[in-house]
Amino acid sequence: MQLIIGNHNYSSWSLRAWLLLRQFDLAFDTTRIALFTPGSAEQIKAYNPAGKVPVLLDNGTTIWDSLSICEYISERHLQHKGWPSDHTRRAHARSSCAEMHTGFMALRHAMPMNCRRHVDNFTIAADVQQDIQRISTLWSEALSQSDSERFLYGDFSIADAFYAPVVFRLTGYGVKLPRQLQAYCDRILALPACQEWLTLAQQESEVIDAEEV
């Protein structure tokens, strides 16, 4: 498999697919395209006419969009282990990922992912606080269904990959969370795969002035 991604520092969409592959120790090659640089749009369109990353190439099959990629990985390479086996947990996990995929625009715009940046005394607007509260509710509901409370639905799943960029955001902008949810963020950040992503982000030099990539 070959995964086409954007900048480690900024591309939250890329992180989702990359983290799922890495966490499940699947073999793949990474092609990084520095976003918003001369020729980058054409490079991406050579893989995906929609002009977006990530893109997964797998034996002649092209999959684009982070949720579609994660679903494909689960079905094709994980025997559906990307989702919880229990149908109730699986329904909640899919719903929470769909909500993340299309929502939380206030948080996305006000707190873009930037792994190299740490903000002190960040002022949280009312609409951003509403997004944070909704995410906190989703996480609390998920963890209440988990036996181990290590990840959102027990074992690591697509849901954890999807919310990892939120973990990076909340941590980088110094958002205070209830103890249970902060402990969850700490566990995600401590994953070797997340530490690897952060290291790669630190090694990048590009600076992007964009709200959401």
Image (spheres, rainbow, N blue to C red):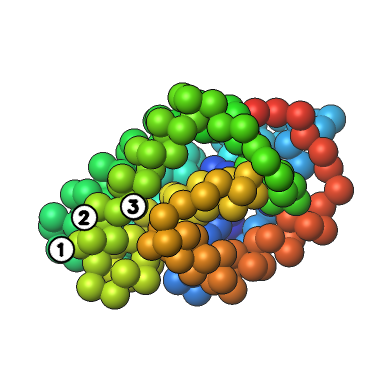
Q: Residue at x 66, y 67 (%)?
A: 196
- Residue 182 position, x and y percent, is 47, 60
Looking at the picture, which amino acid does disc 3 mark?
Trp
Mark 3 highlights which residue?
139
Q: Give 116 or 157, whichever is nearer the viewer.
A: 116
- Specify which label sits upstream in the sequence, 1 or 3: 1
Is residue 14 something one can see in this rendering? no
Q: Give 50 or 157, whichever is nearer the viewer.
A: 157
Mark 1 highlights which residue?
86
- Quadrant (top left/top right/bottom left/bottom right) for the C terminus: top right
Looking at the picture, which amino acid does disc 2 mark?
Arg
Q: Residue at x 19, y 57 (%)?
A: 89
Mark 2 highlights which residue?
90
Residue 168 shown left or right of residue 116 in the figure: left
- Quadrant (top left/top right/bottom left/bottom right) for the N terminus: bottom right
Image quarter for residue 202? bottom right
- Residue 133 position, x and y percent, is 38, 39
Q: CA distance from mark 1 to mark 3?
A: 17 Å
Q: CA distance from mark 3 to mark 2?
A: 14 Å
Element under disc 2: helix
Is residue 36 something one can see in this rendering? yes
Q: CA distance from mark 2 to mark 1?
A: 6 Å
Image quarter for residue 124? top right
